[in-house]
Image: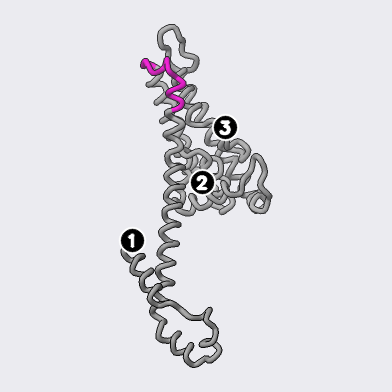
Amino acid sequence: ETGLLAGFFLPGDSLLVTAGVLSIANGDRPAYFSPWELTAALTVASIIGDQTGYLLGRKYGQTMETKPDSWWYKRRHLQAARDYFAEKGPLAIVLARFVPLMRTFVPFAAGMGEMAPTRFLRWNILGGILWINSLVWLGHYLGGTPLADQLHKVILIVIVISFIPVVWTAAKRLLTSSVLDELTRRSLLARVIKARPEIEAMTEESSEAREDKSLIVSWDSLEKKKAELDEL
C-alpha cells in the first residue's frame, strides 16, 4: 500500500488494528502474534514501502505525470498528493501515514519534487514508527476487552475515522472554491457599477452603440443585484 501506486486500495489502518487485536489472548482465543515482533517487522516494512515509493517518484515521476488514467492509476490522486505535500511540507510524510490514498501517493510526490534523500528518510522513519506503533498497540489494547468479540465493528469504526481527514479536506476545498467564486462575482459586479460613468460616456459618443439595444445596461438591476450580494 505504501510502496506501489497500484496498492492504494489495500487495507491499511484497519489491518494494523486487527493485527494488534490478534496479538493478545482473550478467552479461548490465543495470541497469534507477539506485539513486539509485530510492531518491529511492520515498522521496517512501512519504512521500506515509503522509501520505495520515493525512489519510484524520483525515477518515473515525470513519466507518470503524463500517463493516462487507468483502473489502478488516477492522475487526480497524484495531484492531490502534490497539493498536500506542498501545503504541509515535510510533515506531510508523517501525516499522510494516517490518511488513506495520501500515504500511497505522498512519497511518490516527494520523489518527484526531488526532496533530499536523507531528509525524506528521517521523516519516513518517524512516520513509520508513529503509524505502526499507534495502531498496533491500539488494537492490542482493544484485543483484551469485550470489543475483541465484535471485531467487525472495530474495523468499521477505524475505517470511518481514517476517512474523516479525506472528507474534511474535500469539504474545505469545495467551500473555499464556492466562496472564491462568490467573491469574484461581487468584485466584477462592483467594477462594472464603478465604471458606469465612463461606459455611459462611451455609449453617448458612439451612435452605433445608441442604436444597438443589446448594449443598453440596466444600471438599476445591477445595483439591486449588488445590494443583494452584500446582504448575503
Point out residue 225 in the picture as x, y percentages from the top left corner.
Answer: 38, 69
In the picture, residue 133 is in which quadrant?
top left
Which callout, 2 or 1, points to the residue nearer the camera?
Answer: 1
Q: Earlier in the sequence, mark 3 or mark 2?
A: 3
Give the Cα distance between marks 2 and 1.
46 Å
> Magenta segment, which residues?
144-156
Label 1: which secondary element: loop
Closest to the observer, 128 or 154: 154
Q: Which residue is mark 1?
A: 232
Q: Which residue is mark 2?
A: 120
The kind of secondary structure the magenta stretch mainly shows is: helix
Q: Pick the quarter of the image with the C terminus.
A: bottom left
Q: Earlier in the sequence, mark 1 or mark 3?
A: 3
* Mark 3, other Cα within 10 Å: few <14 / some 14–19 / many ≥20: few
Which callout, 1 or 3, points to the residue nearer the camera?
Answer: 1
User: Where 216 sits versus 109, above or below?
Assistant: below
In the picture, residue 161 is in which quadrant?
top left
Label total for image = 3
* Mark 1, other Cα within 10 Å: few <14 / some 14–19 / many ≥20: few
Q: Residue at the location (48% across, 36% down)?
A: 128
Give the Cα distance between marks 1 and 3.
45 Å
210 sits to left or right of 183: right
Q: Which residue is mark 3?
A: 10
